[in-house]
Image (cartoon, rainbow, N blue to C red):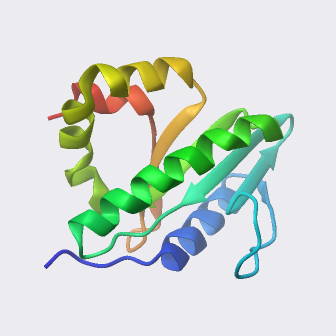
Amino acid sequence: MPSIVTNDATETALRKLLVERGYTVSAKRSYGETGSDVVAKKGSEKICVEVIGYKSSGPARAKDFFEVFFRAISRIKDGAGKCVIALPSRASVGLPARAKQYGEGWKRLGEAFPELELWLVDVEKGTFVETHWNDWLSRD
């Protein structure tokens, strides 16, 4: 069974890492409060982050991913220079297959939304990797 990583653990790790990189981050939202999970700013740069965890169920992971996509791109209206979907690094195992499955559609989404990124957060190591949406088309 895949390791479960909660939304909260992912968000907490990412917040800490962004502060270490010199960003100011928004206050943690209350349950039910709308808006980005994390808004990070440094100078004129504004990053809006939507966070999802890693669930044991494949269908639940897919549902979370598709829902967070629309939340992420909706942050363009908020002036986001980057619209980020942050997810546990464990999710990188399935991302190449997902990108390949959607092929041209995945590619067009990346072209239509150049500010869309996927960040992989390693909660245990305390690191994250920034990737662009269409980077996943070339990974196997």
Position of the N terminus by quadrant? bottom left
Looking at the image, residue 4 lies above or below residue 53: below
Looking at the image, residue 98 lies above or below residue 33: above
Q: Nearer the viewer, residue 15 or 74?
A: 74
Q: Nearer the viewer, residue 101 or 42?
A: 101
For residue 73, what is the image quadrant?
top right
**Looking at the image, can residue 103 be seen?**
yes
Q: Position of residue 16 (x, y in %)?
A: 63, 68
Q: Position of residue 101 (x, y in %)?
A: 19, 34
Looking at the image, residue 109 lies above or below residue 69: above
Residue at the image position 74 percent from the left and 37 percent from the top: 80
**Looking at the image, can residue 89 be seen?**
no
Q: Position of residue 75 (x, y in %)?
A: 71, 43
In the image: residue 131, left or right of residue 75: left
Total marks shown come to 0
Position of the C terminus by quadrant? top left
Q: Position of residue 18 (x, y in %)?
A: 65, 57
Looking at the image, residue 102 lies above or below residue 94: above
Q: Nearer the viewer, residue 31 or 80?
A: 31
Q: Nearer the viewer, residue 20 or 84?
A: 84
Residue at the image position 71 percent from the left and 77 percent from the top: 32
Residue at the image position 51 percent from the left and 46 percent from the top: 69
